[in-house]
Amino acid sequence: MTDPRSRAKGAGSASRRDFLMGSTAAAVGLGLLQNAHAAGNDVIKVGLVGCGGRGTGAAENICEAAGTTYNIKLHAMADVFEDRLKNCRENIRSNHICKDKFDVTEERSFVGFDGYQKVIEYCDLIMLATPPGFRPQHIEAVVKAGKQLFTEKPVAVDGPGIRKVLAAHDEAVKKGLSVVAGTQRRHQASYLESLKRIHDGAIGDLVTARVYWNQGDIWAHKRRAGMNDMEYQIRNWYHFVWLCGDHIVEQHVHNLDVALWALKAHPVRAVGMGGRQVHTEPERGQSYDHFAVDYEFPNDIHILSMARQIDGCENNVSEQLVGTKGRWDSNGHRFAGGAKGRVRIQHETNPYVQEHIDLLESIVTRHPVCELKQVAESTLTAIMGRMSAYSGKAVTWQQALNSKVDTFPSHLAWGEMKEPPVPAPGQIGIF
């Protein structure tokens, strides 16, 4: 499926990470690590579930990450749409980076809602790049099968989905599996160095932060003649809550993740607002075009969050952290106040590639990492903000986590799928 991040291109040198060797997950014990591969001739069979733009990009990224250091083969693929799968296969096969790593036959190309199960069966490492609504059940199945995992963000769109992911985290740690998520800032050298300095006290104690993903318009697909409800909604997945979670969840999760990373905590309460100021066309489904949320963290620390997708406005995708001794801005990774200057990294590896280097390194060295809990908490933070904006009510962490509102269909089938109404603040419950 497509993703507004599209495909990342280019990378520098493939540096390895010291933190992998010291992973807390290594304490699980090497005997429990399933599907691990020692560096050498063992082939890691990689499977892709979700063959849109981000899935294609992820496949290219892992091929670039592997280079000549890690022995991988793209072995199986699945998507609910045959045209998406075929286009993805051709794009990857024709990419020179993937040429000697491509091993996806017609027999290992699966179409349908159950295709992910077959990819899991054939492969050692599964990459999930479907619309986010599918992630909880796919993550659950991968971990249950004892396979290594790369999952795109976010990892759910509602409280029931988050609970599945948190349970999968516990199981993955017990099994000694490696799981890396697509929150690529956690693998970007300039962010890693910046957050290290911040945690070492470069700007003092954190007192507030501002996080933004304000950009222009995002894509929306009009319904074509003959499309049934399910096909239309999945092809236009960005504008239906059960598939996307709205852009505060699907996209703004990156910026919120930086805030949680910096504070080493999750929010306790959210008060937000949002709406459809400009985009009211039928193909916009349930999605809002703007959000603004005040997140309250422990010790009465408040963070301002904004997300907008409207053309003609000022764009800003960044994070600013403010402490008692100074501040830091992700644009240029600049410090001001007590610790002036900026973080400069020579030959920084493309983070979309680096996250796969880190995953492959953890597998071949048998030092597992598991990022499911941190990405689940960042995802739930975004869900809290959406719930508050949709309802017009304050939402606590526990309310969001324990919510019984399960947006995912009880049965997946082509055909009728009623569209929920556009959420109206003050007129609906906590959603």
Image (tube, rainbow, N blue to C red):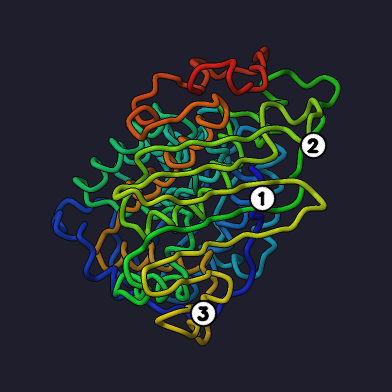
Residue visible at 40% across and 52% down in the picture: 125
Q: Is residue 124 something that shows in the picture?
A: no
Q: In which quadrant of the rendered view does residue 290 lie?
A: top right
Residue visible at 58% across and 19% down in the picture: 426
Q: Which is more toward the observer, 234 or 330?
A: 330
Closer to the eye: label 2 or 3 = 2
Tag shown at residue 278: 2
Judging from the image, what secondary structure is the residue with disc 2 in?
Answer: loop
* Residue 33 spot, x, y in % from top left: 22, 53
Q: Which is more toward the observer, 277 or 107?
A: 277
Residue visible at 21% across and 69% down in the picture: 22
Q: Which is more toward the observer, 27 or 257?
A: 257
The residue carrying mark 3 is 348
Of the numbered discs 1 and 2, the one sitting upstream in the chain is 1
Amino acid at dot 1: Pro
Graded by Cα atoms within 10 Å as few (under 14), some (14 to 19) or many (20 or more), the crowding at tag 3 reads some
Asked if labels 3 and 2 touch by Cβ distance under 8 angstroms, the answer is: no
